[in-house]
Amino acid sequence: MTRTLIRVDAELSRELAGKFPHLRIQTHRTQSTLSGDIEDQEELQGVLNYLSSVGVTVVEVVTIPD
């Protein structure tokens, strides 16, 4: 499992944030960050694909050291 931070160029609605209950959502003006444990590359790709499918631009993906 890898601790990951995903920065997106949008304020996520409660409904959209609810799609990722295992990730902590923080909003910073017009950007949001999702952070938490991602099981593997497949799960990460699923999160990124979903965000893209609803029109949210991913700005950055960072692995957080333990």
Image (cartoon, rainbow, N blue to C red):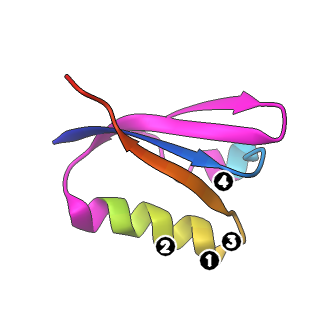
| Image side of residue 64 versus residue 10, left or right | left
N-term-proximal mark, 2 vs 4: 4
Residue that badge 4 annotates: 16
Q: Per the image, is 32 magenta?
A: yes
Q: Nearer the viewer, residue 41 or 21?
A: 41
Task: Tell me which segment is drawn in magenta.
Answer: 16-43
Residue under the image location 59 percent in, 37 percent down? 33
The disc at residue 49 is 2
Q: Could you tell me how far apart the alpha carbons at marks 3 and 4 are, in whole angstroms?
A: 9 Å
Find numbered disc 1 in the image and state the secondary structure of the residue it sits on. Answer: helix
Contact, mark 2 vs mark 1 (Cβ under 8 Å): yes
Specify few, some or many for label 3: CA neighbours under 10 Å numbering under 14, 14-19, or 20 or more: few
**To which residue does mark 3 refer?**
54
State the separation of the CA atoms marked 1 and 4: 12 Å
Q: Is residue 18 left or right of residue 40?
A: right
- Under mark 4, the amino acid is Leu
Q: What residue is at 76 percent from the left and 50 percent from the top?
A: 10
